[in-house]
């Protein structure tokens, strides 16, 4: 079988593209190694999405899942490991199967950057986390730390402050890169302890779990978990082999979100852009899907 369209990645951009394509009558297949909604599943609160004030990320992700299910959209929980562009056909290889399509939309988003510290891989899930919503409750009334200075770090620190005893917020610079409202909320939280102009030097282990952190000034923080939010890198491994990724791993697209390869589109956080927002990802998915629909119907 040759699908009209395969969509890789089912965050907001991918889900939107799938809805438009399905409603237009295209034969589509959607693939994602994770959960529908992507990074939405790790967001505590969303206040800037029209019509969904003060909704949680998992709630919005569940709504997307429900819509996918109700529309009977063909979805498989498989990781894409390679894509071969054969001009008129694209071959999408997963860890389980191989599929063919006429058009491809890449919507794989971004993944968390690593700290580059010894013991980092060992501690992942044992005192090192990238998801406060997932793991915060495990450290109820305990001391934890958050590293990062952007909106994600500050948002997660606020979430953890309502669960944990103390939250150390570690940032390598003096100023945070977040909205004034968010910074003000951080400053008002008495159990959020700021550690500005500091870097983590070592992750200290005891019994295969995080025991403490050592900072570059010699200070030791006795915390049981470090939540890391130092930025993201695009999830573009197979895009690199296609020659689509730039030096930073992002995919360049035109105004219709088509890449340098005909019939291959990219949307969402995988592309280089000014705003990484749910609402912009939705628009990108809709535009790319509409272009595919027009090209399919024209044949």
Image (cartoon, rainbow, N blue to C red):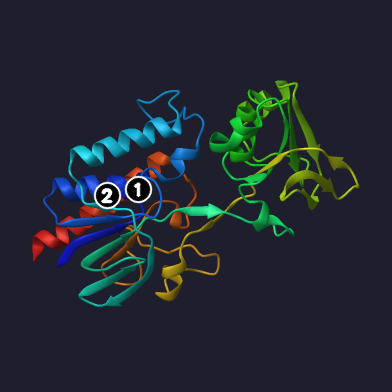
Q: Quadrant of residue 40?
A: top left
Can you say which quadrant of the picture contains the N terminus?
bottom left
Rendering quarter of residue 167? top right
Q: Position of residue 273 (x, y in %)?
A: 47, 53
In-front residue for pair 197/205: 205
Q: Would you place residue 110 above or below residue 65 in this image?
A: below
The residue shown at (32%, 65%) is 96
The answer to whether 86 appears left or right of 233 in the picture is: left
Image quadrant in which the C terminus is located: bottom left
Q: In the rendered structure, are the residues bearing label 1 and label 2 in contact, judged by CB atoms less than 8 Å apart?
A: yes
Q: Which residue is mark 2?
A: 17
Work out how far the residue at label 1 is from the one at label 2, CA to CA, in angstroms. 6 Å
| Residue at x-position 54% and y-position 34% | 133
Residue 10 position within the rendered picture, expressed as x and y whole percent measured from the top left: 35, 49
- Left or right side of 130 for 99: left
Q: Is residue 255 left or right of residue 219?
A: left
Q: Disc number at residue 272?
A: none
The spot of residue 193 in percent (x, y) is 78, 30
Residue lying farthest to the front in this orientation: 207
Within 10 Å of disc 1 (Cα), the crowding (few <14, some 14-19, many 20+) is many
For mark 1, what is the residue?
A: 13
Res 136 quadrant in image: top right
Which of the pair 275/96 is nearer the observer? 96
| 187 displayed left or right of 138 | right
User: Which residue is located at x 34 percent, y 43 percent?
Assistant: 282
Q: Secondary structure at mark 1?
A: helix
């Amino acid at each position: 079988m040759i699908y009209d369209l395969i969509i890789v990645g089912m965050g907001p951009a991918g889900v939107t593209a799938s809805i438009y394509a399905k409603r237009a009558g295209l034969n589509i297949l959607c693939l994602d190694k994770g959960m529908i909604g992507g990074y939405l599943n790790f967001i505590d609160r969303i206040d800037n999405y029209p019509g969904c004030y003060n909704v949680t990320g998992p709630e919005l992700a569940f709504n997307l899942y429900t819509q996918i299910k109700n529309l009977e959209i063909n979805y498989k929980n498989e990781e894409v490991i390679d894509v071969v562009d054969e001009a008129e056909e694209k071959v999408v290889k997963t860890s389980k199967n191989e599929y063919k399509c006429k058009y491809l939309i890449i919507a794989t988003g971004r993944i968390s950057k690593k700290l580059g510290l010894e013991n980092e891989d060992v501690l992942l899930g044992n005192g090192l986390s990238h998801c406060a919503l997932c793991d915060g409750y495990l450290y109820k009334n305990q001391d934890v730390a958050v590293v990062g200075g952007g909106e994600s770090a500050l948002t997660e620190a606020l979430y953890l402050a309502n669960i944990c005893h103390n939250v150390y917020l570690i940032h390598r610079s003096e100023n945070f890169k977040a909205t004034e409202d968010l910074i003000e909320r951080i400053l008002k939280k008495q159990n959020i302890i700021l550690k500005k102009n500091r870097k983590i030097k070592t992750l200290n282990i005891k019994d295969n779990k995080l025991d403490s952190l050592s900072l570059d000034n010699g200070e030791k923080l006795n915390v049981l978990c470090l939540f890391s939010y130092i930025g993201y890198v695009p999830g573009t491994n197979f895009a690199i082999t296609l020659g689509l990724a730039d030096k930073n791993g992002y995919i360049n697209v035109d105004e219709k979100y088509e890449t340098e390869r005909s019939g291959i589109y990219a949307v969402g956080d995988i592309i280089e852009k000014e705003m990484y927002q749910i609402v912009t990802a939705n628009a990108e998915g809709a535009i790319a899907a509409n272009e595919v629909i027009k090209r399919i119907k024209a044949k």
